[in-house]
Image: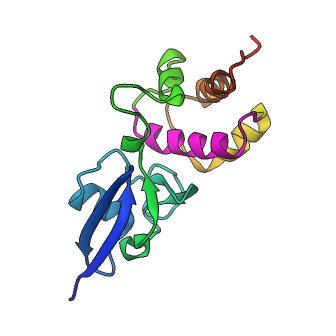
C-alpha cells in the first residue's frame, strides 16, 4: 500500500509525515509523532478523549484521517502549555483537583480551550453543554466545570463568584 506525504503544522511546528491512507490522525499523532497525550477511549468519536483542535475547530482525532491534516494547523494537548508555563486551564484543573485518573483530561482541556476561544465568558450551562462530548468516569464533572469557569474568569482578568 502506498503512503501519503502530509505537511501540516502541529503545536506551532511545521511537521511532515508519511502515512497509509487508512490511518487516523490519532494513530499518527501517537504512533508516528509520539504525541501521546491524546487518548483513544472509544475509536468512534463518542468519548472525546482524543480531542484536538484543527484550524481552531474541536475534532475527534480518531475520526479524522491523517491524510486530511494536509495543510491544516493542529493543536494537541502537548501544545497547550508554553514551555514550563501552563495554560490557565491546566493550572485551574490542578488547583480545583478537576482530574482523577487523567485519561479524559487532555480531551476535556482541548474542548474547554475551544469553548473559551469562542466564548471567553460562558455560563455554567454553556460550559456543561460544550463539554458534554467528553466522558469522565471519575470526577462527576463539577470540579471540571468550576475549573473551566475559573480559568475563563482569570483569562478575562476577573474573578469567579463563590
Q: How many marks?
A: 0
Residue 43, percent from left and from top? 42, 62
Residue 50, percent from left and from top? 44, 53
Residue 95, percent from left and from top? 51, 15
For the point 54% across and 17% down, the residue is 96
Q: Is residue 37 left or right of residue 146?
A: left
Identify whether 70 is placed above or below 103: below
Q: State the image quarter where residue 62 is shown.
A: bottom left
For the point 42% across and 70% down, the residue is 69
Q: State the image quarter where residue 31 is shown.
A: bottom left
Q: Residue furthest top?
A: 162
For the point 64% across and 21% down, the residue is 154
Q: Main secondary structure of the magenta part?
A: helix
Q: Is 148 one of the magenta-colored residues?
A: no
Q: Is 108 one of the magenta-colored residues?
A: yes
Q: Is residue 134 left or right of residue 102?
A: right
Image quarter hosting the N terminus:
bottom left
Q: Residue furthest bottom?
A: 1
Q: Is residue 133 left or right of residue 123?
A: left
Identify whether 21 is placed above or below 144: below
User: In the rendered view, how is the structure colored?
Assistant: rainbow
From which residue to which does the magenta span run?
Answer: 102-122
Identify whether 5 is placed above or below 37: below
Image quarter hosting the C terminus:
top right
Residue 139, percent from left and from top? 53, 28
Q: Is residue 85 left or right of residue 93?
A: left
For the point 76% across and 32% down, the residue is 124
Amino acid at each position: 500500500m502506498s503512503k501519503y506525504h502530509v505537511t501540516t503544522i502541529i503545536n506551532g511546528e511545521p511537521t511532515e509525515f508519511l502515512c497509509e491512507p487508512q490511518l487516523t490522525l490519532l494513530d499518527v499523532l501517537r504512533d508516528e509523532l509520539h504525541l501521546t497525550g491524546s487518548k483513544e477511549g472509544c475509536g468512534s468519536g463518542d468519548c472525546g478523549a482524543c480531542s484536538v483542535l484543527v484550524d481552531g475547530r474541536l475534532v475527534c482525532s480518531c475520526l479524522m484521517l491523517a491524510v486530511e491534516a494536509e495543510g491544516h494547523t493542529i493543536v494537541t494537548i502537548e501544545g497547550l502549555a508554553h514551555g514550563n508555563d501552563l495554560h490557565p486551564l491546566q493550572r485551574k484543573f490542578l488547583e480545583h483537583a478537576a482530574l482523577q485518573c487523567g485519561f479524559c483530561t487532555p480531551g476535556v482541556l482541548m474542548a474547554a480551550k475551544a469553548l473559551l476561544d469562542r466564548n471567553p465568558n460562558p455560563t455554567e450551562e454553556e460550559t456543561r453543554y460544550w463539554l458534554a462530548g467528553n466522558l469522565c468516569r471519575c470526577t462527576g464533572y463539577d470540579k471540571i466545570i468550576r475549573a473551566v469557569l475559573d480559568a475563563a474568569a482569570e483569562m478575562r482578568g476577573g474573578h469567579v463568584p463563590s
